[in-house]
Amino acid sequence: MQQLLADCFAFLAASPSPYHAVHTAAGLLRAAGFVHLEESAPWALVPGGAYYVTRNGSSLIAWRMPGGKLGGWRGAAAHSDSPAFRLTCTKKEDAYYARAEVEPYGGMRLCSWLDRPLTLAGRILVRSKEGVVSRLIAPERDLLCIPSLCVHFDRDGAKGAPLDPKIDLQPIFGAAGEDLSAVLAGEGGVCPRADILDYDLTLAVRQAPCTVGLENEFFMAPRIDDLACAFGTLTGFLAGTPCETRGDVWCLFDNEEVGSGTRQGALGSFLPDVLARAEAALGLGAEQRIAARANSLFLSADNAHATHPNHPETSDAAHPVVLNGGVVIKYNASQKYTTSGLTGALIAEICRRAEVPVQAFYNRPDTPGGSTLGNLLARQVSVPMADIGLPQLAMHSAVETAGCADIGHLACAAAKFYSSVLTQKTDGSWEIA
């Protein structure tokens, strides 16, 4: 348990941007023997082979080919992005301070970013002799802060008045006249500075993950949503038992926090393209592909709201969700989550066999909930799905809170999921072996 938690903390700390999350996951996959493929090149896939491919540097799909005839796919999808400020300008004219310009990405808890040490993370696009190359940067020092207006000048702000991102949430990083591009050039090993053509960078919290509580039962970290689910499902994927008749898939998508409607998002063609190429390598015809996908099962793994200790009225009292209470299966009558009675029963049974506790999440009937990967991914790949997640507090804050035991719960459930043989004998009835 302690080693798993330490590995999770290392994964979170090494992934301050979607590009770093993909880079970190790719390293774990290569260490496990997975072969890196380029999407723009022909693939020579073999039965039983293990592969991964990236798109835009911020999304990744890994898979194991079946050793024999494909009977169906088992997959889990998490997302690499988190709400954060995106850098739009490295230098803003100001008479007193060096300032950058940023804009919010995703549904942020804006006030949580005030008065924190911040750095930059992501990629810079650099001119080279061959053309344009991407380089990851994440300075191991704090460079910026977003200072709040003191209570003496902002009595309404002390009472929770709204923040204007353009006015209240622009960061400073030095004395007037300084330019962040010098830091970018130094971090990327670029000389001259003019060779930096563009960038995809966010402000990032460097605070190290840490445990809290009398028994160290909780942990706090940036980007728990959704990198904790990414880590847990990837750990289970790597620990799963391959099957001759099953293909295993693990997905990490970007842009979930802004609707997934991008080439590298869940609404893009990434997963359908990968599955189509894998099925073609197996020699499957159209009818065999349709049958295999009907006999598939996918998990949409994104965190769930735990019942808040100070505001329990925001949750459905009939379905409390608590930290360290186990894997959360998420339901929504409007199908914002994809879980049906059938897929929920399958996941609950797999968890029972893995001796993993489960919890059910429902929004209050009078409170609309957000959507996640599942109902969007299902538009691209029509397979049975269930939405699951880890319970957490302070979702979309700069630093969030979750339960230490739940990392093990998810990893164990995912390993059982990737080791079980599920067969849909008739519509609505499945065998689990």
Image (cartoon, rainbow, N blue to C red):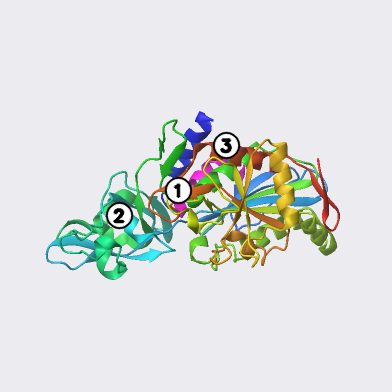
Please give the residue where the numbered disc 2 appears in the rendered image.
Answer: 184
Residue type pointed to by label 3: Gly
**Main SS type for the magenta part?**
helix
Disc 3 versus disc 1: nearer the observer: 1
Q: CA distance from mark 3 to mark 2?
A: 38 Å
Residue type pointed to by label 2: Leu
- Callout 1: helix, strand or loop? loop
122 on left or right of 73? left
Q: Look at the numbered discs 1 and 2 and tell me whether their residues touch, using CB distance below 8 Å.
A: no
Q: CA distance from mark 1 to mark 2?
A: 42 Å
In percent of width and height, residue 290 lies at 80, 62
**Which of the two labelled residues, at mark 3 and mark 1, occupies the earlier sequence position?**
1
Please give the residue where the numbered disc 3 appears in the rendered image.
Answer: 408
Local packing at callout 2 (Cα closer than 10 Å; few below 14, some 14-19, many 20+) is many
Q: Can see residue 22?
A: no
Disc 1 versus disc 2: nearer the observer: 1
Query: 268 or 210, which is in the foreground?
Result: 210
261 over 248 or under it: above or below: below
Query: Which residue does the image show at 28% across and 63% down from the upper left?
Result: 169
Q: Which mark is residue 395?
A: none
Residue 20 included in the magenta stretch of the image: yes
Which residue range is magenta in the image?
A: 18-35
